[in-house]
Image (cartoon, rainbow, N blue to C red):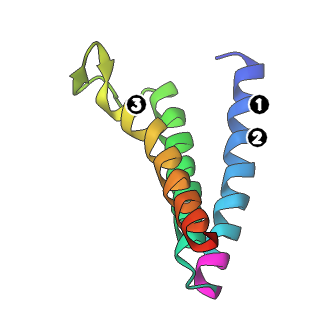
Amino acid sequence: MLTEQVLVILVRLAVGSIATFLAILVWSRTRDTAWIFVVIAMILQYGEIVFTTLELFGLAQAELVVWAGVPLVEIVLHTLPLISLAVAFVIVVARRS
């Protein structure tokens, strides 16, 4: 693995862990539904970062379940954070109208 790839992986893991830690702190201090979905999105995004890292090192496999030629794990890990954010935004918009 190239040095540049290792540096990118380490930076993503470091920044993601800090953001996830702060998100969990927000979760413990708020009971607002929209914020909880934002926190869930961050946790899911960090899960995607960790899984991608494990896959690069050969410790995990995404190709166990394939749907339409794409590993189902990749589809789920890439879309769940976005779905969670979308739900949070819908909650905020519904509250404001």
Q: From the viewer's perspective, is 89 left or right of 10?
A: left
Question: Along the line of sight, which residue is nearer the eye, 63 or 40?
Answer: 40
Question: Along the line of sight, which residue is nearer the eye, 94 or 65?
Answer: 94
- Rendered-image quadrant of the C terminus: bottom right
Q: Residue at x 30, y 30 (%)?
A: 72
In the rendered image, the vertical position of residue 43 relative to residue 94, given as above or below: above
Instruction: Tell me the kind of residue under disc 3.
Output: Glu
- Would you name the residue on which mark 2 appears? 11
Q: From the viewer's perspective, is 25 left or right of 64?
A: right
Q: Compare marks 1 and 3 and give the one earlier in the sequence.
A: 1
**CA separation in Å, label 2 and label 1:** 6 Å
View extreme (front): residue? 97
Element type at marker 2? helix
In the rendered image, the vertical position of residue 67 relative to residue 93, given as above or below: above
**CA separation in Å, label 1 and label 3:** 22 Å
- Would you name the residue on which mark 1 appears? 7
Q: Quadrant location of residue 94?
A: bottom right
- Rendered-image quadrant of the N terminus: top right
Q: Estimate the x, y position of residue 2 in percent, counting from the top left.
A: 71, 16
Q: Residue at x 57, y 80 (%)?
A: 32
